[in-house]
Image (cartoon, rainbow, N blue to C red):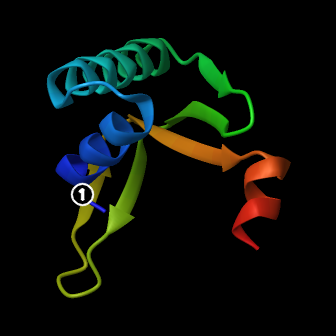
Amino acid sequence: MDNKQLQATLAKRMGRNNADIAKLLDALVTTIRERCGELDSIAVPSFGTFEAKKKLERIVVNPGTGKRMLVPPKITLTFKPSALLKSKLK
């Protein structure tokens, strides 16, 4: 399912137009991005938890050339589904 299909499905279920749903989804994604950028976690009841984790810088070796490179630190976003969501998917 892509973004437009998600918007259409939510609009149909909620009885709203696609523009309202697009604004709602944009606000949700923006909030998740901002909070996780600050390394906070976001729990959505009955859905799951979004958690930002910081990976430290590290040195990797290119196997073809043997050259060593420094990989900069980065923040990754992980999602852990709730038990209710897991049970519904099974």
Q: Amino acid at mark 1?
A: Asp
User: What residue sits 28% from the left and 26% below the top?
Assistant: 21
- Label 1 crowding class (10 Å Cα cut-off): few <14, some 14-19, many 20+? few
Q: How many marks?
A: 1
State which quadrant residue 17 falls in.
top left
State which quadrant residue 49 falls in.
top right
> Quadrant location of the C terminus?
bottom right
Observer-nearest of 42 and 87: 87
* Residue 71 visible (yes or no): no
As drawn, is 57 to the left or to the right of 47?
Answer: left
User: What residue sits 70% from the left and 67% below the top?
Assistant: 89
User: What residue sits 59% from the left and 16% below the top?
Assistant: 40
As drawn, is 3 to the left or to the right of 84?
Answer: left
Label 1 sits on a secondary structure element that is loop
When the figure is inspected, residue 14 is found, relative to residue 36, above or below; the finding is below
* Residue 17 visible (yes or no): yes
Residue 6 pos. (x, y %): 31, 48
User: What residue sits 38% from the left and 13% below the top?
Assistant: 34
Observer-nearest of 16 and 33: 16
Residue 63 pos. (x, y %): 29, 84
When the figure is inspected, residue 13 is found, relative to residue 64, above or below; the finding is above
As drawn, is 52 to the left or to the right of 68?
Answer: right
Observer-nearest of 23 and 43: 23
Provide the residue designation for mark 1: 2
Q: Residue furthest bottom?
A: 64
> Quadrant location of the N terminus?
bottom left
Residue 5 pos. (x, y %): 24, 54
When the figure is inspected, residue 20 is found, relative to residue 7, above or below; the finding is above
Residue 23 pos. (x, y %): 23, 18
